[in-house]
Amino acid sequence: MPLKITKAADPIQIDRLVLCIYGAPGLGKTTLAFTADRALLLDFDKGAHRAAARQDSVQVSAWGDVAALTAEELAPYETVIVDTAGRALDCLSLKIMGDNPKMKGYGGALSLQGYGALKTAFTGWLNQLRGMGKDVILIAHSDEQRNGDEVIERLDVQGGSKGEIYKCADAMGRIKIIDGKRVLIFSPTDTAFGKNPAQLPPLPIPSPEKDRAFLAGVIAQTKAKLNEQSEAAVAELKRFTELRDTFMAYTEAENFTAAVGSVTTPKDKALLNECAIAAGFVYDKSGKQYVRAVKAAA
């Protein structure tokens, strides 16, 4: 099978993404997730009954309940909610240790080899869901740790597995209470993790009665921004390539000197100078013009 290479000038279309939402218990993480587009909840935490505006769910007792999900079963849904990611990883850990006792370490926890298997299996499962054309929302509780007077927020997920959630999440937001209102914040701070590719400001979270598609809009906006950035990068590469071809075609010092006034960015100025040097010219600062390199040396 030939290697499929995405050229630098080709846009990378983002159709599906993984979103992580975390926060303290009781802040409405599951309720918020249910405002995504046609959501199905994989209820590892057994808390679907507490969510407002509850939608379809799967009560998960063992990893086998979700490992064999098919495209046909997920066809009616656009979004898969994993509630919580920590419980899902616990469930998967039991499956791994049950299949291979060598993966069990001291005290009944995963061994180092077992954690490697856990990361591989969980990442592969998320990729499988995305491959089925689903957005994935990972819900996690937050773990607060004190560093002097500062409260540091982290994901409450076992061991090194939280690192896999950080890496696989395209966007990560936390729910906070500010002035008595719930707010979704994507930007990272000195004391909290976040990923904000769409550069969204802090977003007040409406009640599901007022906006049953709030998170669907956030996800759509994030995708649009990522795709906009991709298209802008393609346009910039095309412009820069054409400018380089123009400069490379110059054969006279006068051509390079005339182009000095038309380049405005440091990147374009550096390109002009590189092309001039390649053609045998250098910039004479006293005369404010390009001259033959040999003449400048003399």
Image (cartoon, rainbow, N blue to C red):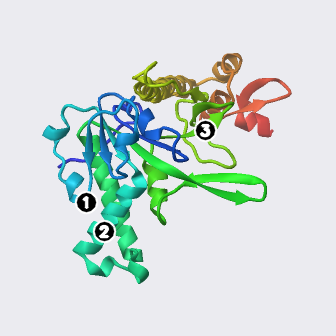
| Element on which disc 3 rests | strand
Task: Please report the residue visible at 63 percent of the width from the left and 27 percent of the height from the top.
Answer: 268
Tell whether label 3 touches label 1 (CB within 8 Å).
Answer: no
- Vertical placement of residue 183 versus 69, above or below: above
Pick the quarter of the image with the C terminus: top right
Q: CA distance from mark 1 to mark 3?
A: 32 Å
Residue under circle 2?
94
Mark 1 surroundings within 10 Å by alpha-carbon count, few (fewer than 14), some (14 through 19), many (20 or more): some
Q: Is residue 263 above or below residue 285?
A: above
Circle 3: residue type: Lys
Q: Which residue is mark 1?
A: 62
Q: Is residue 4 visible?
A: no
Q: Compared with residue 280, is residue 264 higher up or lower down, i.e. above or below?
A: above
Q: Residue at 72% of width from left, 27% of height from top? A: 290
Whether tag 1 and tag 2 are in contact, CB under 8 A, the answer is yes
Q: Is residue 103 visible?
A: yes
Amino acid type, mark 1 = Ala
Q: Give the x, y percent position of residue 207.
A: 48, 25
* Front residue (pair 161, 148): 148
| Gap between marks 2 and 3 measured at Cα | 32 Å
Q: Residue 176 bears which disc, if any?
A: 3
